[in-house]
Image (cartoon, rainbow, N blue to C red):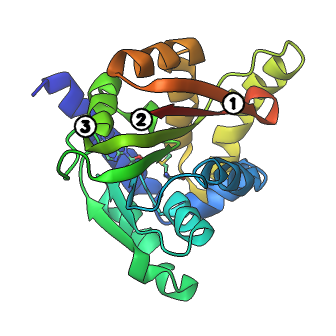
């Protein structure tokens, strides 16, 4: 196993462990509650799939797992994350939702998914693919655990290209967001990481090419909120 990748994972895990108790609140504040609409919209794109278990990778405090369970009555969700604190913070809210019998959180690495080949009818990754140390390895693992005909759905922040939106967004991301995060939760460093991880992530065309190289077909990107967020889909 690559040492740099392992070090990077340890760092990412520590960052999320430090914000896990405030993650949901900060997400809602920093996205002005848009995060809920983005997840709702993303999960709607899975409504035509045949029933079967869904894998939610980088599940964090389980917001996307909950949306998956809410939108399809018989759906079961395996929620995988390598930060135990994030999963535990999400678990606290599960009983109140009545969905706990259909969401199964597991501590594990998205780059070595703890499931046999061809298990899931869909796999979602909400705001997590950017955090993977080895993106290609993660995508190959997702491809492995999907059934033939299964769908991958990635919801991810992106850099808007619109010349009017871009400077406002950059100012928000690099200056305002770390300050608000620091005021709300005292975790400026974690949200500086968020800004730098968005800046360092692949261009949408690069990610789409990687999906095709991994073996996904009908690969597609949909932009939300003026390109601040993208939904990528592909079929096995
Ligand atoms: C920004 S949070 C996203 C949480 C949630 N999916 C959402 O929609 O808000 C990213 C999550 O990815 C997890 N993560 C990052 N790299 C991972 C990996 N290699 N394996 C499993 N989880 C990982 C982090 O622990 C963190 O909980």
Where is residue 203? Give x, y as percent: 56, 14
Q: Compared to 128, does 39 lie above or below?
A: below
Q: Which residue is mark 3?
A: 144
| Label 1 element class | strand
Please tell me which residue lies in front, 65 or 3: 65
Q: Quadrant of the N terminus?
A: top left
Q: Compared to 221, does 59 lie above or below?
A: below
Where is residue 27? Give x, y as percent: 64, 54
Identified at 59% across, 64% down, the residue is: 67
Cα distance in 3D space between marks 1 and 2? 20 Å
**Crowd rating for badge 3 (residues with CA inside 10 Å; few <14, some 14–19, many 20+):** some
Where is residue 115? Give x, y as percent: 20, 52
Instruction: Kindly indicate the quadrant of the structure image that contains residue 84.
Output: bottom left
Identified at 46% across, 31% down, the residue is: 130
Q: Is mark 2 within 8 Å of ligand 1?
A: yes
**Disc 3 and disc 1 in contact, CB within 8 angstroms:** no
Where is residue 186? Give x, y as percent: 56, 54
Please tell me which residue lies in front, 161 or 70: 70
Instruction: Kindly indicate the quadrant of the structure image that contains residue 195.
Output: top right
Q: Is mark 3 within 8 Å of ligand 1?
A: no
Q: Which residue is mark 1?
A: 222
Identified at 59% across, 52% down, the residue is: 48
Please tell me which residue lies in front, 219 or 11: 219
Does label 1 or label 2 sit earlier along the sequence?
2
Cα distance in 3D space between marks 3 and 2? 20 Å
Does label 3 or label 1 sit earlier along the sequence?
3
Please tell me which residue lies in front, 59 or 235: 235
Q: Quadrant of the C terminus?
A: top left
**Crowd rating for badge 1 (residues with CA inside 10 Å; few <14, some 14–19, many 20+):** few
Q: Which residue is mark 2?
A: 131
């Amino acid at each position: 196993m690559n040492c740099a990748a392992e070090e990077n994972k340890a760092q990412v895990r520590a960052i999320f462990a430090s914000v896990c108790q405030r993650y949901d609140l900060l997400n809602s504040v920093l996205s002005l509650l848009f995060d809920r609409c983005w997840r709702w919209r993303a999960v709607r794109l899975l409504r035509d799939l045949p029933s079967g278990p869904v894998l939610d990778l980088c599940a964090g405090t389980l917001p996307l797992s909950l949306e998956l369970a809410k939108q399809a009555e018989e759906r079961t969700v395996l929620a995988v994350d390598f930060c135990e604190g994030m999963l535990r913070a999400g678990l606290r809210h599960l009983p109140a939702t009545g969905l706990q019998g259909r969401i199964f959180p597991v501590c594990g690495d998205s780059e070595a998914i703890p499931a046999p080949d061809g298990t899931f009818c869909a796999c979602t990754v909400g705001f997590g693919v950017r955090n993977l140390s080895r993106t290609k390895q993660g995508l190959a693992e997702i491809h492995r655990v999907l059934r033939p005909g299964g769908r991958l759905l990635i919801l991810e922040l992106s850099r808007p290209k619109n010349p009017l939106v871009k400077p406002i967004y950059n100012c928000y991301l690099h200056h305002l967001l770390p300050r608000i995060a620091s005021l709300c939760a005292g975790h400026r460093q974690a949200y500086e990481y968020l800004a730098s991880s968005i800046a360092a992530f692949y261009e949408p065309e690069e990610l789409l090419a990687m999906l095709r190289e991994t073996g996904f077909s009908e690969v597609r990107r949909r932009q939300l909120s003026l390109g601040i967020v993208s939904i990528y889909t592909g079929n096995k």
